[in-house]
Image: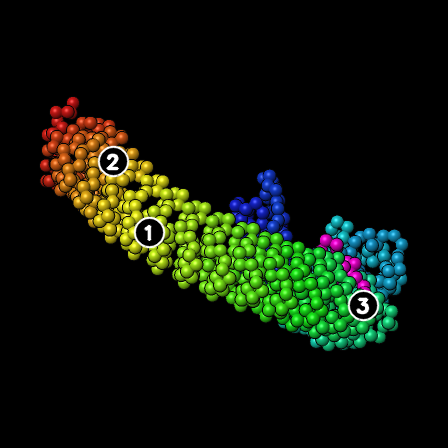
C-alpha cells in the first residue's frame, strides 16, 4: 500500500527534468518505498531508472497530515496528536508498516516508545521457556552474522566453527547446546514478516533500524556471546568502552557499552582478529583513540609469548582488496598514521621489519612524516629505516614532511642525509613542495643542503617560478642566493619576472631585476613583464622595469602593446610613464584598435589628453571602420568629441556599415555632440548601408531636440520620411507635436510616403487620434485613399477610437475629414 506524500510528489517532479535521482533520509523514513514506487510508475512509461544522489531536505519531512494519512492506511485509524507521539521518531513509515505485526499493543505507546514495544515482546519470548528461547537463539545468530545470514549456512554437516557458534549461542540463550541447524532455521522462519525476512537466500531483519535495536538488545543481554562470535565489523562499529565515549560516539543509536568485567574478553577478540589478518579493522577501532584502552591492550599483548608478539607486529592485512590504498596495511603503518606512540614503542621492541610497506609502497616512516608525529619519527629513525623509500606515487618521507610544513620532522630526516632531490611521479621535489606551500623555514633547511634549485616538475615549474608567482619573498631571496636561473621558464613560457610583474609582487620584482634577467622575454602568448604590469595597473613595477630599458613597443600575440593595455584599462600614471619612453602611439592590435581608440571607447579622458599631446592618428580606424570620433560620439563622451574635433578629426569617416559619427550620436540621443558635429558641417544626408539617415534614426528613437537640430539643416526628403518613421515607431513625444509636423513639412517631404504595409502619416495620425496633426496633413494634401485599408478607414477610425469623444472639436474634425475624402467615397 503506497501513500503519496509531498516528498514522493517532489521526486516525480524532479524526474521530469532530471534523468536520475537519489533519495536520502534517516533509516525507515520511506526512501526505498518511494524509490521503488516511482521506478514502477516510470517503468510503465518506458523510462530507465538510475538512482544517484539528492541531498536531504527538511522541507520535505512528513507533515502531521501526511503522517495521519499513512497511519490511517496501514493501521486503519487516525491517531490523535500524531506529531507529538512521533516527534523523536525519524522512521515513522517503518513503524506504521510494522505495527500490524504486533498483537494487543497500544497504538500510542507503540509510537511513543517503539523499541520498548519490541523489547517487551523479546522479553516475553524469553519467559516462554524453550519455545521462545529457540526463536531468540535464531535471532542472535542472525545478529552475529551482521544481518547477512546466508541460508546455505544451515545446509550440510556442522563444521567445527559452526559447532562452536551454535553451542555458545544456545548456552547463552539457555537451550540445548546440541540444537541442530535445522531446528534453528525452522525457528528463524517462524519470525518471517515480524522480525526477519529472506531475500536472495539471505536472512536479515525486516529493516536496518530493527537490526540496530537487536544488536543493542542482545549486547546488553548476552554481551560475552556477541564479543566472542559476532562479525568483526560489529566489533569495530558497535562496542564502546565506557571511558572512550566522546561527542562523536555518544550520539550513535544503540551503541553497546563494554562493562569493565568484559574488557579483557573484548581485547582478546581484537587480538584474535588481528592474528588472522584483520589488521585494518582492529586499528580503525574507535576505542584505540583512548590512551587508557591502549594501555589495557598493551598489557595483554605483553603477556603473550615473544614469538606471538613478533608474529603480530609483522602481520599484514589480508582483508582489504588489492585495488584499495589500505591493502597490505601493517600494525606499524597504522599506529604511525594515527600517532599511537605507546604502541609504536611496543611494536619496535618486537623485531618488526621497520621498512615493511603496504601494497602501494607506503611505510610507517612515510605515514608519521606526513601526519606530523615527531616522536614516532624519532623512534623509527633509531631503527635506521630507509629514509629514501617512496610509495608507488614517488612520495618520500622528506617530501611529505616538507609539503605539510612539519619543520621538526624535516630536521630529523635531514640528519639522516636523505636524497633531497628525490621527486614524486609528477616531478615535485621537497624544495618545490615547501616553496609551493610557503614553508620558508623548511625551504631554508633544504637550501642549506644544496639541492638542485633548477629541478622542475613535469610542467617545467621551478621553485623560483612558483615562489615568484605566489609572492613568497623570503623564499625568492634564498633561491637567488643559490644562483637560481631567473630566465628558466615552464612549458608555457612563464618566467619568474613575468609572474611577479603580473601579480604585483613589487619586492620580488626588485630582487629579480638585480639578477639582470631578460626583461623582454615573454610567454607562449607573447606576454611580457612590462605588458602584464601595465595591464594590471602595477605602477611601481612598471617604473622598475622601465629603468631596465625594455622594448615599450613589444606586443603580445594579439598585437596589444603595453601602452594599449594601460590606455584600455584607464591606468593614467602608467600611460604617462610609457609615453615618456616615446612608444609608437599608433601601434594597433590585430583588430586595428589603437591606444587612442581604446581610451576613448572606455571614456578615459585624461589618457586621451596625454595621447593627443603625442599627435596620434585621430582618424586611425579599426578593422570595422570604427574611428575615435565615432566611438566618442556613439558613447556620449562630449568632452572627448571636443578634443578630437580640435584635432580636425574627419567627421565623415564611416564604419563598414556606413555609420558616421553624426548618425550614431543622433540615434543614441547625444544632443550636444550632434550640435558639435553639425558645427563641423557633418553631412546630414549621409545614410548607412540600410538607407537610414541621422534624421530617420533620431525620429525612430524619439529624440525631439535632435530632430529639430537636423531639420534646421534642411535635410533631403527620402522615401522613408521622418514623419512616417516617427509614427510607425509610435514616438508620441514627436508625433503628438504639431510643431514637429510643421518643421517636417518645411522640407517638403513626400507626405504620402508609405511604410512596408502601405500606411502613411495620415493613417497613423488618425489611428492615434491626433486631431490637430490630421488637419495639418490634410491641409498639405495628404492622400487619405492610398492605405491598404478601405477608403472609409480614416473616418471610421475617428468615430470608433476608444480615447475620443464626439465633442464639438472632434465632430468638426470629422466633418473636415469627410469633406476632404467625400469625392473618393462611392
Is disc 2 placed on a helix, strand or loop?
loop
Q: Of helix, strand and loop, which mostly describes the magenta segment?
A: loop
> Residue 519 in the image: x percent, y percent?
47, 56
Question: In which quadrant is the C terminus drawn?
Answer: top left
Q: Give the crowd class for mark 3: few <14, some 14-19, many >=20 residues within 10 Å.
A: many
Image-based side of 562 in relation to 741, left or right: right
Q: Which residue is mark 3?
A: 352
Occupied quadrant, residue 90? bottom right
Earlier along the polypeptide chain: callout 2 or callout 1?
1
Residue that appears at 68% across and 56% down: 393
Q: Compared with residue 799, is residue 618 higher up or lower down, i.e. above or below?
A: below
Q: CA distance from mark 2 to mark 1?
A: 27 Å
Q: CA distance from mark 1 to mark 3?
A: 74 Å
Earlier along the polypeptide chain: callout 1 or callout 3?
3
Q: Give the crowd class for mark 1: few <14, some 14-19, many >=20 residues within 10 Å.
A: many
Q: Find out whether the residues at labels 1 and 3 contact each other: C-beta distance under 8 Å.
A: no
Q: Which residue is mark 1?
A: 599
Residue that appears at 71% across and 75% down: 291
Magenta highlight range:
312-329
**Comparing marks 2 and 1, which lies closer to the viewer?**
1
Tell me, for residue 687, which label it has, or none. 2
Residue 313 covered by magenta stretch: yes
Amino acid at each position: 500500500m503506497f501513500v503519496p506524500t509531498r516528498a514522493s510528489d517532489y521526486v516525480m517532479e524532479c524526474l521530469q527534468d532530471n534523468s536520475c535521482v537519489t533519495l536520502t533520509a534517516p533509516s525507515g523514513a520511506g526512501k526505498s518505498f518511494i524509490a521503488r514506487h516511482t521506478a514502477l510508475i516510470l517503468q510503465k512509461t518506458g523510462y530507465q531508472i538510475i538512482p544517484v544522489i539528492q541531498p536531504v531536505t527538511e522541507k520535505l519531512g512528513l507533515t502531521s497530515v501526511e503522517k495521519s494519512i499513512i497511519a490511517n492506511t496501514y493501521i486503519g485509524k487516525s491517531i490523535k496528536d500524531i506529531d507529538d507521539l512521533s516527534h523523536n521518531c525519524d522512521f515513522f513509515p517503518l513503524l506504521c508498516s510494522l505495527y500490524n505485526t504486533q498483537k494487543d499493543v497500544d497504538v500510542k505507546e507503540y509510537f511513543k516508545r517503539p523499541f520498548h514495544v519490541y523489547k517487551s515482546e523479546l522479553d516475553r519470548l524469553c519467559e516462554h521457556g524453550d519455545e521462545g528461547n529457540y526463536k531468540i537463539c535464531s535471532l542472535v545468530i542472525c545478529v552475529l552474522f551482521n544481518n547477512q545470514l546466508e541460508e546455505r549456512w544451515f545446509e550440510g554437516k556442522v563444521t567445527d566453527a559452526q559447532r562452536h557458534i551454535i553451542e555458545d549461542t544456545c548456552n547463552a540463550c539457555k537451550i540445548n547446546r546440541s540444537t541442530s541447524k535445522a531446528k534453528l532455521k525452522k525457528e528463524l522462519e517462524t519470525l518471517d514478516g515480524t522480525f526477519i525476512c529472506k531475500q536472495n537466500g539471505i536472512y536479515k531483519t525486516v529493516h536496518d533500524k530493527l537490526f540496530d535495536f537487536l544488536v543493542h538488545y542482545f549486547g546488553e543481554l548476552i554481551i560475552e556471546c556477541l564479543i566472542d562470535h559476532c562479525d568483526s565489523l560489529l566489533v569495530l562499529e558497535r562496542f564502546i568502552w565506557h571511558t572512550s565515549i566522546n561527542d562523536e560516539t555518544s550520539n550513535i543509536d544503540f551503541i553497546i557499552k563494554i562493562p569493565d568485567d568484559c574488557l579483557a574478553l573484548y581485547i582478546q577478540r581484537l587480538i584474535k582478529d588481528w592474528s588472522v589478518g584483520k589488521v585494518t579493522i582492529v586499528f580503525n577501532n574507535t576505542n584505540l583513540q583512548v590512551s587508557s584502552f591502549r594501555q589495557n591492550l598493551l598489557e595483554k599483548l605483553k603477556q603473550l609469548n615473544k614469538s606471538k608478539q613478533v608474529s603480530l607486529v609483522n602481520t599484514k592485512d589480508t582483508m582489504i582488496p588489492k585495488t584499495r590504498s589500505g591493502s597490505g596495511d601493517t600494525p606499524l603503518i597504522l599506529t604511525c598514521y594515527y600517532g599511537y606512540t605507546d604502541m609504536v614503542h611496543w611494536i619496535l621492541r618486537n623485531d618488526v621489519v621497520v621498512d615493511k610497506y603496504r601494497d602501494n609502497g607506503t611505510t610507517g616512516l612515510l605515514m608519521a612524516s606526513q601526519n606530523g608525529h615527531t616522536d614516532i619519527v624519532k623512534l623509527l629513525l633509531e631503527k635506521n629505516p630507509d629514509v629514501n623509500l617512496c610509495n608507488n606515487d614517488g612520495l618520500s618521507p622528506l617530501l611529505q614532511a616538507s609539503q605539510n610544513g612539519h619543520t621538526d620532522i624535516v630536521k630529523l630526516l635531514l640528519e639522516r642525509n636523505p636524497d633531497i632531490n628525490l621527486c614524486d611521479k609528477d616531478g615535485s621535489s621537497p624544495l618545490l613542495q615547501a616553496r609551493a606551500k610557503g614553508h620558508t623555514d623548511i625551504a631554508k633547511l633544504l637550501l642549506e643542503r644544496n639541492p638542485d634549485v633548477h629541478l622542475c616538475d613535469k610542467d617545467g615549474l621551478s621553485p623560483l617560478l612558483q615562489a615568484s608567482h605566489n609572492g613568497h619573498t623570503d623564499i625568492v631571496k634564498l633561491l637567488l642566493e643559490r644562483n637560481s636561473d631567473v630566465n628558466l621558464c615552464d612549458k608555457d613560457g612563464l618566467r619568474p619576472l613575468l609572474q611577479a610583474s603580473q601579480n604585483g609582487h613589487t619586492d620580488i620584482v626588485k630582487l629579480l631585476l638585480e639578477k639582470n634577467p631578460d626583461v623582454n622575454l615573454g610567454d607562449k602568448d607573447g606576454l611580457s613583464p612590462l605588458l602584464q604590469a601595465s595591464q594590471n595597473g602595477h605602477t611601481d613595477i612598471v617604473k622598475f622595469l622601465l629603468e631596465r630599458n625594455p622594448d615599450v613597443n613589444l606586443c603580445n600575440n594579439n598585437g596589444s602593446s603595453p601602452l594599449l593595455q594601460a590606455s584600455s584599462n584607464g591606468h593614467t600614471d602608467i600611460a604617462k610613464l610609457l609615453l615618456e619612453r616615446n612608444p609608437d602611439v599608433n601601434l594597433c592590435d590585430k583588430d586595428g584598435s589603437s591606444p587612442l581608440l581604446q581610451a576613448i571607447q572606455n571614456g578615459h579622458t585624461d589618457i586621451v589628453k596625454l595621447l593627443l599631446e603625442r599627435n596620434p592618428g585621430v582618424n586611425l580606424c579599426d578593422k570595422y571602420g570604427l574611428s575615435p570620433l565615432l566611438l566618442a560620439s556613439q558613447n556620449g563622451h562630449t568632452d572627448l568629441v571636443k578634443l578630437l574635433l580640435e584635432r580636425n578629426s574627419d567627421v565623415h569617416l564611416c564604419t563598414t556599415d556606413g555609420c558616421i559619427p553624426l548618425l550614431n550620436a543622433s540615434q543614441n540621443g547625444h544632443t550636444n555632440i550632434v550640435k558639435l558635429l553639425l558645427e563641423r558641417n557633418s553631412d546630414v544626408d549621409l545614410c548607412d548601408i540600410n538607407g537610414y539617415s541621422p534624421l530617420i534614426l533620431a525620429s525612430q528613437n524619439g529624440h525631439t531636440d535632435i530632430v529639430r537640430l537636423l531639420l534646421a539643416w534642411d535635410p533631403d526628403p527620402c522615401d522613408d520620411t521622418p514623419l512616417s518613421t516617427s509614427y510607425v515607431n509610435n514616438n508620441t513625444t514627436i508625433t503628438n507635436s504639431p510643431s514637429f509636423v510643421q518643421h517636417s513639412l518645411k522640407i517638403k517631404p513626400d507626405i504620402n510616403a508609405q511604410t512596408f504595409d502601405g500606411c502613411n502619416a495620415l493613417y497613423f495620425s488618425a489611428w492615434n487620434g491626433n486631431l490637430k496633426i490630421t488637419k495639418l496633413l490634410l491641409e498639405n494634401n495628404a492622400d487619405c485613399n492610398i492605405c491598404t485599408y478601405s477608403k472609409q478607414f480614416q473616418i471610421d477610425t475617428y468615430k470608433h477610437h476608444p480615447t475620443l469623444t464626439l465633442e464639438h472639436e472632434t465632430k468638426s474634425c470629422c466633418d473636415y475629414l469627410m469633406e476632404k475624402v467625400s469625392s473618393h467615397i462611392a
